[in-house]
Amino acid sequence: MIEYELVGNDLGEVRFAISPLNELVLSLRTLRDPGRFPLQLPWLRATEAARAGLPLDLLRALTNEALWTPDFLTPRPYTPLGRIDDELAALTGTPNGVVRADLAEIHPGTLPAVLRGRPDRVLTRVLAGLREYWEACFEPYWQRMRTVLEADVVHRGRVTARSGLAVMFADLDQHVRLEDNVVYVRLRSDLSYRTSTAGRGLTLAPSLFSRRATAPISADEPPHIMYPARGLGTLWETETSTPAIALVGLIGRVRARLMGLLETPTSSTELAVRLDVTPTAVNQHLRALRAAGLLISARHGRSVLYRRSDLGDRLMRGT
């Protein structure tokens, strides 16, 4: 059990962040054991040809049978919306002792051959391999992935505003809870420690590649919880359902389809992908629906996310 003691149970101690590096590294679990990640199989199939030219032995060696990854490769993000170039660059200064210790933590017996050698040279190989992996398998899909992650963060903010921190933490994952001023994260392993967030805060990072909440292996790492993002089941879907005839007659087919998709916050880019239309066309319809009071919008980072308003929900329930 990991225990993070919040100072004063204050919302200011808790913040959300999206890290492309964390997602990149956590996705290596799908390469080792794809059967545990059925919702990512469409992405694995789509990137199969691109992976053929990658150093797969090296990438798979960065996880173990328990699907742990080295802490130094999943650092706590320090900006709400990280950039992969900045996050990879920050890893170049990782001390040799940290590289050696973190790799030994996930491979306590003998290191795989591809991870042996001087730690600085191993680090260089690892970062180069991750860069190749990003460009081949992540960069073409990151906008879509990020949209789902941003929508999750907006949802958590609404839950906190309406129901408070304890409900928000319970909503993250069944293995996370807040009691008094302590956040408890129950892991599969016997690993346990307790540490304070004083002066460091607690960062919550939604992930498309976590099946349950996880935290750093070491108590020396800054407080950080990665948890399964909402909406993963819709990530690779396209919209194929037929809206109700009455609703189509009222607002038109495209706008009716949009209303059906906007139960959760979504960007115009993601809506365009799922409806197979241009972002310009989607934005025109979104503006009209928002002007009619059927949608509301909120900015998160560089994206604007839309969702149905209470009036929009009532309209959908009446169809």
Image (spheres, helix red, strand yellow):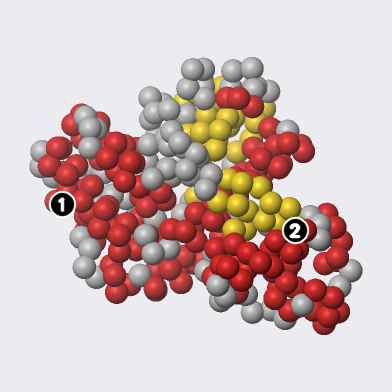
Residue to which mark 2 is pinned:
290
- What type is the residue that disc 2 sits on? Arg
134 sits to left or right of 114: right
Q: Badge 2 local density, few (<14 within 10 Å), some, or many (20+)?
A: some
8 sits to left or right of 66: right
User: In the image shown, does 240 or 247 lie closer to the viewer?
Assistant: 247
Q: Is residue 174 above or below residue 56?
A: above
User: Where residue 144 appears, x then y in whole percent?
Assistant: 50, 61
Task: Please state, as top left, top right, bottom left or bottom right, where the C terminus lies in the image.
Answer: bottom right
Q: Quadrant of residue 46?
A: bottom left
| Residue at figure coordinates x 71%, y 42% from the top left | 158
Mark toward the start of the polypeptide (1 vs 2): 1
Q: Are marks 1 and 2 in contact (CB under 8 Å)?
A: no
Q: CA distance from mark 1 to mark 2?
A: 54 Å
Q: Quadrant of residue 74?
A: top left
Circle on res. 114: 1
Query: How many numbered marks appear?
Result: 2
Q: Secondary structure at mark 1?
A: helix
| Residue at figure coordinates x 42%, y 43% from the top left | 82
User: Where residue 105 appears, x then y in whole percent?
Assistant: 29, 37
| Residue at figure coordinates x 55%, y 51% from the top left | 303
Q: Is residue 290 above or below residue 280?
A: above
Q: Quadrant of residue 272?
A: bottom right
